[in-house]
Amino acid sequence: MIDLYTWNTPNGRKISVALEEMGLPYAVHTVNISKDQQFKPDFLKISPNNRIPAIIDPDGPDGQPISVFESGAILLYLAEKTGKFMPKDPRGKVAVMEWLMWQMGGFGPMPGQVHHFLMQPEGPARDYGFARYHKETRRLYGVLDRRLAGRDYVASEGEPSIADFAILGWAWRHERHQVPFDDLPNVAAWYARMMARPATQRGFEVALS
């Protein structure tokens, strides 16, 4: 059974969704980031950057335990372990990795900054920060909407990939970062399609806090 160290955040939800979709048994260990539990020495041993999520797989390579930190690395590890949600052909793999890196590098950090500035006291600094990062977040949603035109999933055909799980974790918070889907029809259809999957629903329902 995989040990999942996490909290109820977009990055945490990526992994609970992936574990459910892949049918892997796991146990949740909450790391309350509002109480700085991510800085405890025991967690530092498996997540040197003091960020959730992280996993310990007792049945890692060669049957030996392995710990993995960073949500993108975890998704890649789980896809390789199970042989699921990652295309076999090289071109398909490249597409999945492109969109996974797109999420890790932009569609996560940018809406994360929107969340941050929305929580600040009203004033010029809040207004500037929100306007800057909200504009970029909206642009990224536009990129995603264009990508999904005529496609059911972001990077693969026929079924989602780990890139969909990664992006969905942040799209799940679209209302919080004030991006309605009114003018994003392709994103809206993809989001509904993903959220209708029973395993994905379980991944969002499992208690992570």
Image (cartoon, rainbow, N blue to C red):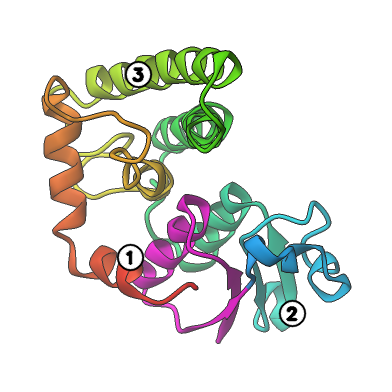
Residue drawn 39% across the image and 20% down it: 140
Position in image of residue 46 (x %, y %) = 79, 67
Q: Earlier in the sequence, mark 1 or mark 2?
A: 2
Q: Which of the numbered marks, if any, corresponds to residue 138?
A: 3
The reply to whether residue 152 is in sight is no
Position in image of residue 43 (x %, y %) = 78, 70
Position in image of residue 119 (x %, y %) = 52, 38
> Left or right: where does residue 68 sit relative to residue 200?
right
Residue drawn 40% across the image and 49% down it: 169
Q: Quadrant of residue 187?
A: top left
Range drawn in magenta: 1-30
Q: Are the residues at dot 1 and dot 2 in contact (C-beta closer than 8 Å)? A: no
Amino acid beneath label 3 = Arg
**Label 1: which residue?**
204
- The reply to whether the magenta stretch includes residue 8 is yes
How far is disc 3 from disc 1 in space, using C-alphas?
A: 24 Å
**Label 2: which residue?**
65
- The reply to whether the magenta stretch includes residue 80 is no
Residue drawn 35% across the image and 40% down it: 176
> Left or right: where does residue 107 sit relative to residue 197?
right
